[in-house]
Image: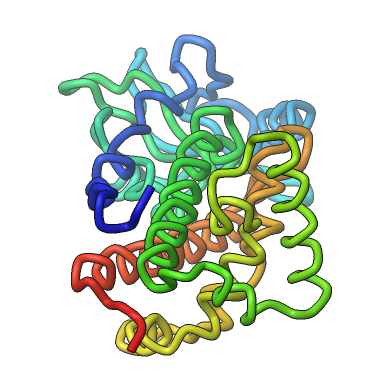
Amino acid sequence: MPSSNRPVPADISSISSSIQARHLQFPMAHAITAAPGDSANDVGALLAAWQFDACPVLEDGHVVGIFQREEGPLSTTVQDSMCNITARNLTAADTPLESLVEDLGTHALIFVLEGRKITGFVTPADLGSAAARTYFYLKLSALEVAAADYLRQRYPHQEDALSALSNGRRSKAQELVASLLADDAFIDIVASLSLQDLVSVLGKDEPFRARIRESGIGWDSLSHGLTGFRNDIMHPSRPFGGATRKGAQGLSKKLRGLTTLTEALISLRQLNVLLP
């Protein structure tokens, strides 16, 4: 389809709100919990056995704190070791995942509120769930679609885009084009490019690089590891982001990068940037 007839990409904010805290939460009714008077050693051992790092502390059916497992013996009660709940440990059920990721980089557990009732909680481990992986895949797909649409507009003669690839990658792309043509499944050259190829072409496109420089984030930081990130999303058996706060911090950084790249592509396409 000619680039002039293709619609402008949809606002990616709809993707950002598609997966919410309510889709990730672990229900309180099924959670391991502790009471303030419980032995910290015993609760810590139970959490370790289930490979959990933290649990809610309940008193008379109400959440009063968070107990986090620590290494080594603790000659205390849960009440002596627990953390108090702050506003940063609470979130509305309709909070988008994108807003949760950064907080999960600093908090082991965030409670989910439906109205005034705590219905469950989210931990860094939940970033590897099917719902979270779906969200990250949607964000990455938005980037791929925006990249393809931009390159179709930027290179009216799509063969010119192949010149930005290494000899080996160019040969593979040309082989795939020939195979698709033989199978009557060819759409266009851009549709035949892998994510790695799309990123390589964009990396040598000056209007795009200039727009990225305006973001203040380096190109190498934005583009590094995108192919591996896509593979991790698509293979549920692979660890994704890890079950730790450090892993959540890494995913938060990756999300900011995906948003920066996608918004740059959409803005350039709306400006109708063409080859000289």
Quadrant containing the C terminus is bottom left
Q: Residue at x 54, y 32 (%)?
A: 55
Q: Residue at x 64, y 30 (%)?
A: 39
Where's residue 151, x and y in %? Answer: 44, 67
Of residues 225 and 8, the one nearer the viewer is: 8
Of residues 266 and 249, the one nearer the viewer is: 266
Where's residue 40, x and y in %? Answer: 64, 36
Number of marks present in the image shown: 0
Q: Is residue 120 above or below residue 240?
A: above
Of residues 109 and 151, the one nearer the viewer is: 151
Camera sees residue 272: yes
Q: Residue at x 30, y 50 (%)?
A: 88
Q: Is residue 87 above or below residue 250?
A: above
Camera sees residue 87: no
Of residues 199 and 23, the one nearer the viewer is: 199
Residue 234, image quadrant: top right
Q: Residue at x 54, y 58 (%)?
A: 190
